[in-house]
Image (tube, rainbow, N blue to C red):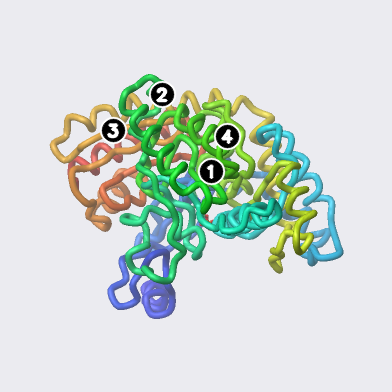
């Protein structure tokens, strides 16, 4: 096993990694339910609850019999066919299901391989829409600070310009219009003065740049990798009004928040606001295969389809991959066949009570919980290897970033698993924070 890890260090990029000073990685021997089996470096294995659900994805846990069966059965039928000129039942059934469960106006589906690509396609669609409407010059996106929308170039351009990756790529990225970050906290009403001044600021910006802006793009209610930051649904109503007033499209990136994570099936439901374009990914396949989707309204689809070019100009090689669609359909059906909202509420309650003690620790600045997401924010940057080790010794896998130790556990976690997770996080922060 030390041979394997040595080869890994020589050969492989990991996410946001350096090859000259690679941070430690652990070898996974197996995974089932909510647990990873990790090589302990001494010929044995050590088990840890995956408090990250493999970055939001693995909502039903590892090796779920229903999802395993869906993949196997599709393999026995066919694993892939090109989507140009051909189609298949898994894609058609999955698209129907997505249209059924997402906000009503969303009626058409574009499948692609990853969240970032779905954001690329959403932005492309918005640009084509404005061209088709004859509004030339509307080539910029309006967004708010603190966002994260993926790692390819168009998504990077709408990530937070300071904490995102803007600074390294200055000059290479499209310069978008950035409004202030919405004030923190889910529970703020429209008459809250801070929310009101945020609304004034973003409205002024929208008016100033209205001739240049094609669409607004945000992560509704919870900013994820930009800072694990919940904000009020009232902000989404402000953005919907601005889009309607100025002829922008409204894009919701629900790649992280989709499929129940914040307590409603889609985070936009907290606000009762429908986007014109929606991106979903991550938990879509229950974490089995890479797949994302962009959904849009009939109005947007028909304007673009009747515009110059007469087509949406995108078509990935692995578009609508049948294995991914089959397992995504099985995952959605599994989710919706149970009282997922009660599960998320119970995880939420467990995270709130279990993490609240962290507030008393000197290293801790803030504790926040929204849906099945729990966040402990420290006063300074986390020492990643130390914090990871401290949590692993307590039986839990976490992957902190910046000043944030956080969890978005699989929905199948028992109350006991949630207690293990919160005790490990609080204990690790106490030891290593
Ligand atoms: C993860 C994420 C993306 C990017 O998805 P990938 O599949 O990693 O390309 C985009 N937007 C949000 C909100 C995300 O959380």
**Residue 348 vertical position relative to residue 399 in the rendered view, above or below:** above
Distance from disc 1 to disc 3, alpha carbons, whole Å, reads 27 Å
Labelled disc at residue 367 = 3
Label 4 element class: loop
Q: Mark 1 and mark 2 in contact? Answer it, CB < 8 Å.
A: no
Labelled disc at residue 340 = none
**Residue 49 seen in render:** no
Mark 1 and mark 2 lie on one chain; the one further toward the N terminus is 1
**Residue 236 vertical position relative to residue 33 in the rendered view, above or below:** above
Residue corresponding to mark 1: 33
Eye-nearest disc, 1 or 2: 2
**Residue 255 seen in render:** yes
Distance from disc 3 to disc 2, alpha carbons, whole Å, reads 13 Å
For mark 2, does the 10 Å Cα neighbourhood hold few (<14), some (14 to 19), or many (20 or more) residues? some
Label 1 element class: loop
Label 3 element class: strand
Eye-nearest disc, 3 or 4: 4
Eye-nearest disc, 1 or 3: 3
Distance from disc 1 to disc 2, alpha carbons, whole Å, reads 21 Å
Report the residue that reaches farthest toward the left: 362
Mark 3 and mark 2 lie on one chain; the one further toward the N terminus is 2
Quadrant location of the C terminus?
A: top left
Mark 1 and mark 3 lie on one chain; the one further toward the N terminus is 1
Residue corresponding to mark 2: 349
Residue corresponding to mark 4: 266
């Amino acid at each position: 096993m030390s041979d394997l890890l040595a080869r890994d260090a020589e050969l492989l990029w990991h996410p946001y990694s350096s090859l000259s000073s690679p941070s430690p990685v652990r070898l996974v021997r197996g995974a089932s339910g909510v647990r990873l089996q990790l090589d302990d470096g001494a010929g044995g294995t050590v088990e840890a609850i995956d408090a990250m659900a493999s970055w939001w994805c693995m909502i039903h846990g590892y090796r779920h019999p229903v999802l395993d069966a869906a993949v196997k059965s599709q393999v026995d039928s066919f694993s892939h066919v090109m989507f140009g000129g051909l189609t298949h039942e898994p894609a058609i059934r999955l698209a129907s299901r997505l249209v059924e469960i997402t906000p009503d106006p969303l009626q058409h589906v574009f499948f692609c391989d990853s969240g970032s690509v779905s954001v690329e396609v959403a932005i492309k669609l918005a640009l084509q829409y404005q061209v088709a409407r004859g509004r030339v010059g509307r080539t910029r996106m309006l967004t708010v600070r603190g966002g994260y929308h993926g790692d390819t170039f168009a998504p990077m351009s709408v990530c937070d310009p300071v904490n995102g990756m803007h600074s390294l790529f200055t000059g290479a990225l499209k310069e978008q219009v950035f409004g202030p970050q919405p004030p923190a906290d889910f529970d703020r009403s429209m008459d809250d003065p801070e929310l009101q001044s945020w609304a004034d600021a973003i409205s002024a910006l929208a008016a100033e740049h209205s001739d240049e802006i094609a669409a607004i793009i945000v992560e509704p209610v919870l900013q994820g990798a930009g800072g694990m930051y919940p904000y009020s649904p009232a902000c989404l109503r402000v953005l919907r009004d601005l889009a309607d007033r100025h002829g922008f499209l409204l894009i919701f990136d629900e790649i992280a928040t989709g499929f129940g994570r914040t307590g409603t099936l889609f985070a936009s439901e907290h606000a009762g606001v429908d986007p014109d374009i929606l991106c979903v990914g991550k938990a879509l396949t229950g974490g089995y295969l890479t797949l994302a989707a962009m959904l849009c309204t009939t109005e947007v689809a028909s304007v673009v389809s009747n515009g110059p070019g007469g087509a949406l100009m995108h078509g990935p090689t692995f578009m609508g991959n049948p294995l991914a669609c089959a397992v995504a359909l099985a995952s959605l059906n599994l989710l919706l066949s149970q009282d997922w909202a009660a599960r998320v509420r119970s995880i939420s309650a467990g995270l709130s009570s279990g993490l609240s003690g962290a507030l008393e620790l000197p290293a801790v600045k803030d504790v926040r919980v929204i849906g099945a997401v729990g966040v402990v924010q420290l006063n300074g940057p986390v020492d990643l290897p130390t914090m990871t080790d401290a949590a692993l010794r307590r039986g839990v896998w976490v992957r902190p970033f910046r000043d944030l130790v956080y969890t978005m556990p699989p929905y199948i976690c028992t109350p006991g698993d949630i207690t293990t997770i919160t005790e490990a996080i609080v204990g690790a922060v106490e030891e290593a924070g």
